[in-house]
Image: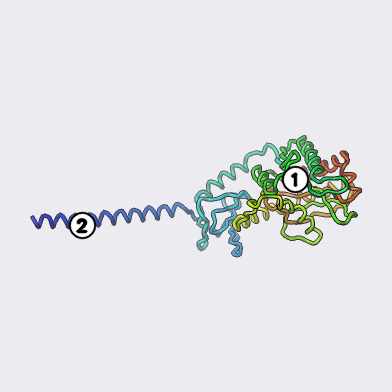
Amino acid sequence: MKNLLRNIFWGLLVFGILFFNGCGSSKRVVHRTARRQEHIKLALEGNNYRYDMRAGIVELDYGNSHLRFLLNSSWVLIDGREVKLPSKTILSGNYLLVSPAVVNYVKNNVALKSRKKKKFIVMLDPGHGGKDPGAMANGIREKDVVLDVAKRVKALLVKYGVKVVLTRDKDVFVSLKGRAKKANRLMPDVFVSIHANASRKSSARGVEVYYVSERVDDSTRAVVATENSVLKLEEKSLHSDKKIETIIWDMIYTDNRAKSKKLAGFIGTRLSRAIGTKNRGVKGAPFYVLKWTNSPAVLVEIGFVSNKGEAGKLNSSRYKEKIAKAISDGILEYLRRS
């Protein structure tokens, strides 16, 4: 009897050891399999890659698309389109370990680009509005003039089959971040913010067009401060620019900067000729609404309300129609060449 009980005891003990070890090894196999499925390898060599060690960004061509990965992050730009992946991207020797979802995203993006586009989309942004009047001088309020001009630009573009959306179509306040969000939801071909200028020098006159840039000269700094000053009227919760978001958006607007500069040149040249005023040039500046918009974007200053002569003209419907025609012609020229 004792021998029987002893044999049963040792049998159960051996079975228990084998059972639990088997379960443990099974779990480890499942875990390793899951880790393998989290990533696939993309070879850097042969894919026209570039590695910016300081920024932690790797660029490469893959499946007829250009990819820009932010290392140790789940963010990637696929042909300029922002995508968040299920897992982080890791650099391992001459390979990138990336989420398998990249393959599907690239296929979908290529299919999207291959479709024939029915019409161009333009977003117009009449500056200021509501509790923010913008520049005021000589009986002119910036918010009123730019809304009128934006509506005229829209009417002209629609005649050419362009879809046009305004960030505001009446006298209401829209935050700078709210304007950028509207643009990013729509993904327009171009974003044009329309403003009127002001200066302490009453003799200052002319038009100027801006594209996004962190470099600011002395003549531009005051304009940037004025147009970005509306941030004071916005909720503090809007200012949560995390480091990761800043890097991503820097990648995006770097891609769009060249296109924006080209668009600015078309509009500036046509505008100064149409209304016979000084062309103050195409300039780069860190306007909030341009920096956080994921499209080629420019900000147009159509004249100085602080200049008595230009302020008087900005009250004229005929003059505003000329401005609108010049802006729409500049946009159309850009769209035709893009």
Type of amino acid under label 2 = Leu
Q: Is mark 1 on a helix, strand or loop?
A: loop
Task: Say if residue 48 shows up in the picture.
Answer: no
Numbered circle sitting on residue 13 = 2
Numbered circle sitting on residue 283 = none
Foreground residue, 305 or 15?
Answer: 305
Write down the quadrant of residue 124 in the picture: top right
Horizontal side, residue 293 vs residue 271: left or right:
left
Foreground residue, 292 or 86?
Answer: 292
Look at mark 1 in the image and give the residue it sits on: 131
Residue 214 in the image: x percent, y percent? Answer: 72, 59
Task: Quadrant for the N terminus, please.
Answer: bottom left
Task: Say if residue 172 shows up in the picture.
Answer: yes
How crowded pointer 2 is (Cα within 10 Å; few <14, some 14-19, many 20+) is rated as few
Looking at the image, is mark 2 or mark 1 nearer the viewer? 1
The answer to whether 213 is drawn above or below residue 337 in the figure is below
Question: N-terminal of the two: label 2 or label 1?
Answer: 2
Residue at the image point whose x is 76% and y is 40% from the top? 171
Residue at the image point whose x is 60% and y is 60% from the top? 50
Foreground residue, 63 or 196?
Answer: 196
Rendered image coloring scheme: rainbow
Horizontal side, residue 42 vs residue 146: left or right:
left
Type of amino acid under label 1 = Lys
Residue 316 in the image: x percent, y percent? Answer: 88, 40
Query: Disc 2 and disc 1: Cα gap in Å?
Result: 80 Å
Write down the quadrant of residue 112 in the picture: top right
Residue 246 in the image: x percent, y percent? Answer: 63, 56
Q: What element carries label 2?
A: helix
Residue at the image point whose x is 83% and y is 41% from the top? 325
